[in-house]
Image (tube, rainbow, N blue to C red):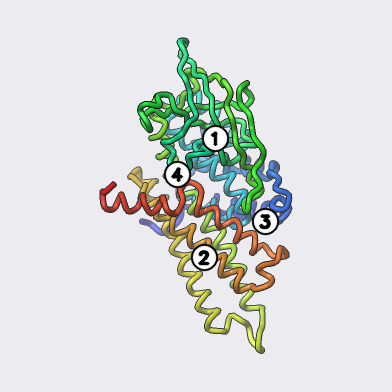
Amino acid sequence: MDFSFTEEQLMIQDVARRIAQEKIAPSAEHFDRLGEFPVENVRILGENGLMGVEVPVEYGGAGMDSIAYVLAMIEIAAGDAAHSTIMSVNNSLFCVGILKNGTEEQKQKYVRAVAEGKAIGAFALTEPQSGSDASGMRCRAVKQADGSFVINGKKSWITSGPVARYIVLFAMTEPEKGSRGISAFMIDTDKPGFHRGKTEPKLGIRASATCEIEFTDYVAQPGDILGAEGEGFKTAMSVLDAGRIGIASQAVGIARAAYEATLEYVKERKAFGKPIGAFQMTQAKIADMKCRLDAATLLALRAAWVKGQGKPFTTEASVAKLTASEAAMWITHQAVQIHAGMGYSKELPLERYFRDAKITEIYEGTSEIQRLVIARNETGLR
């Protein structure tokens, strides 16, 4: 693994850092407080190639690699985690699946609009009764005589659901086959039969809109199938591997923001006549925060590097996601503790970092699921 970055990778990192510092961070408190979707900021991300970092130029993306994506995600997440959630879903969950499995027509229609920031994409796998057990879904797509499918069912916790124009949907086409009977469909939310539920009030990443969606006799044409019939579960799992690199990067960005704020604070805040950073207990916390942050950063980059080599990267992605998400939760916890009353106050962004960090241990595979993935891949036992 080469630890040096290319000029192109550093360039997109710099672009992401500039947008995060000049546009996103200054408005983060506003969007978090109101739970408002940051339409203008998302447009800016799209115009600068950040909504399709790994998407080829011919489909409206930046044409970069996985390392560039990690570097950019970290910068945006350090500015505000909610913005990086929107960016992650568009890059990792929406675009990747279509690029890998879609037809040329689907790539031009769906990927281009989302990569350029002109439309928002979403990924609909989770249902009210099935989270980690994705194979237990109840959403049905019944094939008709003319080859079309009639879709009925609900999906829950859909990131960007309230604002998405296009959605990658997973539904049972042959329930008797279990996970082998799941197919993926491209959904246009402007068509009849699609309904959005209320926007969920969340603990963190509040500017990232989330809702339940429902299908009532929605008609999908044969050209709306993504990949082959019955291959949906396989598509979903492969996309989630890429998504976990994105969430690991998000967690690193949140953790870095909390760590850097804490580092400055312990130099300035005084107690008993000297900076609190001079006290051994504070120094121990700083050292542990630094170690966990560096470990998470390197693991995210390793997973991206392995992916870029065209090798299987399921274990590396899970290791990165598990380590980074738990590091983010721990580091933000320590940051709030060191800041004491000010860390608990909304006057500083520390409490937002703490709230935002928690979701990284939950979505795109909980920490418990990551441990199962890692252990099963290591032992070969199921």
Q: Point out the frontmost of discs 2 and 4.
A: 4
Instruction: Classify mark 2: helix, strand or loop.
Output: helix
309 sits left or right of 86 in the view: left
Q: Residues within 10 Å of mark 4 (few under 14, many from 20)?
A: some
- Left or right: 213 with respect to 348? left
Q: Nearer the viewer, mark 3 or mark 2?
A: 2
Which circle's residue, 3 or 4, is located before the other in the chain?
Answer: 3
Which residue, given by chain and number where applicable, does mark 1 sit on?
A: 155
Q: Which labelled disc corresponds to residue 25?
A: 3
Give the SS element for disc 3. Answer: helix
> Real-space Cα distance between discs 3 and 2?
22 Å
**In the image, which disc is placed on residue 330?**
2
User: How crowded is the residue under tag 3: few (<14 C-alpha within 10 Å), some, or many (20+)?
Assistant: some
Q: Is 366 above or below relative to 327? A: above
Asked if the residue at tag 2 contacts the one at tag 3, i.e. Cβ–Cβ closer than 8 Å, the answer is: no
| Residue 247 % position (x, y) | 50, 50
Residue type at tag 2: Trp
Q: Where on the picture, by quarter, is residue 227?
A: top left
Sequence-earlier tag: 1 or 4: 4
Which amino acid type is shown beneath numbered disc 1? Lys
Pointer 4: what residue? 132
Q: Earlier in the sequence, mark 3 or mark 2?
A: 3
- Whole-Å distance between the Cαs marked 2 and 1? 31 Å
Compare residues 105 and 211 and report the one nearer the observer. 211
Q: Is residue 202 rendered to the left or right of residue 239?
A: right
Q: Earlier in the sequence, mark 2 or mark 1?
A: 1
